[in-house]
Amino acid sequence: MTTILLIKSADQHPSVRETLDSVAEPGETVYFLRLPTVRCLGELIQEVNPMIEYDVEYTISCLPTGYEVADVVDFAVDVEADRICIGIFERTLTGKARIDDLTQSILLHEHVSGDLVVGDHAIILENLDYDQ
Amino acid sequence: MLRIEFQIQPAGISSKLFGLEEQVRSIEIDNALPVTGDRIFLFLTAQFDADVSEERLASQLPETQIVDMAKAEVNQHTYYLGVIVDISEASVLALLTEHRAIPHRIVGRNAHLDVIATVRDWNHLKDVAGTIEDEHGSLELVGTTQTETIGFPLGGNKVKQSMSGKLSDKQLEVLETAYRMGYFRVPQEVTAEEIANELDISRSTLSERLRRVEHNFCELLFGPQE
């Protein structure tokens, strides 16, 4: 199994932990895909310690400046991702996970489908299927 | 199942109401019933900036048959409207039900429509959002959450509806804030002082408003006090 974890902020520990804890399986590869606005992941990675604490291999990649949803989807196709996890940063008054523009574009992308699960700290898209 | 919230541009009856000479603050579809043919009976709550008359509305909405119009007892410039319109006038409602999605709330304010609905899964979400986006030009997803049950469909929240005419917005705000902050929990999670601070009112105003809310609740449950 392969998981992409979209990193929108260097302090999104809760969604990283939730993904590594209850979504990714030991031994699998996790791609930390950061937005160009997120500068340094060193501290986050050091604190969470994916290899020792969660037994997963990880790779850090970055979306290009001026990225579009197609860049995320192309990346997912390249690494044959089974899951994409997107951190939840805010909730609405009624407790719904707030959806930003990039998340909306991924959710409504015509070539990506699968199952959508809303966790405590992350929106998890799994059993992904790419209809190219 | 997924509960979703999204925003779209008003269309049909909602855009007509926003286009009235009288300023509309908010419109909500409380209920909808079928009429023979392609007509639909809509029950709306509309809040205006000032008082309006049925004649004024009727003259500006020639294709809308106003069956009933009643003024809310407590909230200012608020009216309950029963109107019969062509089903295409309630397009988001029609699109949701056509695609087997459950509408929960359709509220118009600040020149857009806020919609809360339940869909089965991700594919259903894409299907429903795609169709509505095609019809309305744009759609902005606001939020989503997982849910086990369909919950109350449009117009199903009877308690809230019967309360809405009996409590003013200010009283509801006090009650909701107190509830959300944990005032009614045992043990209490906040003091009256903290709620009063949050609402920027004095403690005595808070306790007076809460007592009025309780009194109105009891009146609704048990009838007027002897």
Image (spheres, coloured by chain):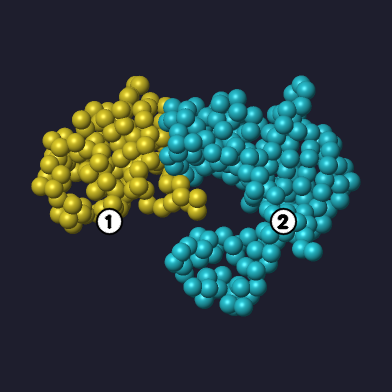
Query: Who's yellow, chain-wise?
Result: A
Name the secondary structure under disc 1. loop
Q: Is residue B70 above or below residue A74?
A: below
Q: Is residue A108 visible?
A: no
Residue furthest out toward the front:
B226
Of labels 2 and 1, the one closer to you: 2
Q: Given the current orientation, which residue lies at the most extreme right position? A: B55
Q: Quadrant of residue B215?
A: bottom right
Q: Is residue A110 left or right of residue B136?
A: left
The answer to which of B164 and A54 lies nearer the viewer is B164
Q: Quadrant of residue B132?
A: top right
Residue A15 x/y as whole percent: 29, 48
Q: Quadrant of residue B177?
A: bottom right
Q: Badge 2 sits on which subunit?
A: B
The numbered dot on residue A11 is 1
Can you tell which mark lies on residue B132?
none
Chain B: its colour in the image is cyan
Nearer the observer, B193 or A1 = B193
- Residue type (three-letter) at the residue carrying disc 2: Phe
- The residue pinned by badge 2 equals B222
**Three-letter code for the amino acid on which mark 1 is drawn:** Asp
Give the CA separation, mark 2 to mark 1.
53 Å
Please report the residue visible at 13 percent of the width from the left and 35 percent of the height from the top: A27
